Image (cartoon, helix red, strand yellow):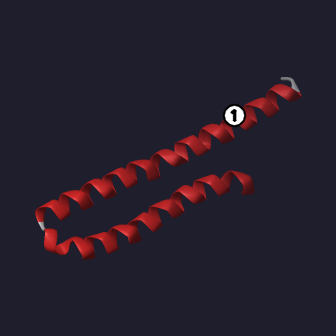
Amino acid sequence: MDVTTLAAVEGSIATVGYGLAAVGPGIGLGILFGKTIESMARQPEMSGQLRATMFMGLAFIEVLALLGLVTPFFL
């Protein structure tokens, strides 16, 4: 196998890896926002507390996306 071919395959794998790492947080954000909006529609008086909890969950999910972005650089 040629050295340039090996380098090209290695770069493609890192790109695919980040793409797969972005799918999980994307699905998680969709579920988080959907369930929060559904809960606010059912109990409007709880919307303030639900919004605060949603932003905490948003922060945790975004950390997963950033870890997926940074991990290929360290490995």
Q: Residue at x 12, y 68 (%)?
A: 43
Left/right of residue 28 with respect to residue 35 in the rendered view = right
Other-residue count near label 1 (Cα within 10 Å), few / some / many at <14 / 14–19 / ≥20: few
Left/right of residue 66 with respect to residue 25 in the rendered view = right
Judge by depth and name the residue closer to the eye, 62 or 67.
Answer: 62
Judge by depth and name the residue closer to the eye, 7 or 38.
Answer: 38
Which residue in the protein does label 1 denote? 12
Q: Residue at x 32, y 58 (%)?
A: 32
Q: Position of residue 48 (x, y in %)?
A: 26, 75
Residue at the far top: name it.
1
Q: Is residue 19 visible?
A: yes
Q: Position of residue 63 (x, y in %)?
A: 53, 63
Counting every numbered tag in the picture gives: 1
The image quarter in which residue 19 lies: top right
The image quarter in which residue 65 lies: bottom right
In the displayed structure, would residue 40 be above or below residue 53? above
Q: Is residue 75 visible?
A: no
Q: Secondary structure at mark 1?
A: helix
Left/right of residue 43 with respect to residue 35 in the rendered view = left
Question: What is the three-letter code of the residue carrying label 1?
Answer: Ser
Judge by depth and name the residue closer to the eye, 1 or 12.
Answer: 12
In the displayed structure, would residue 60 be above or below residue 1? below
Quadrant containing the N terminus is top right
Q: Residue at x 39, y 54 (%)?
A: 29
Q: Position of residue 28 (x, y in %)?
A: 38, 54
The image quarter in which residue 47 lies: bottom left
Q: Position of residue 69 (x, y in %)?
A: 62, 53
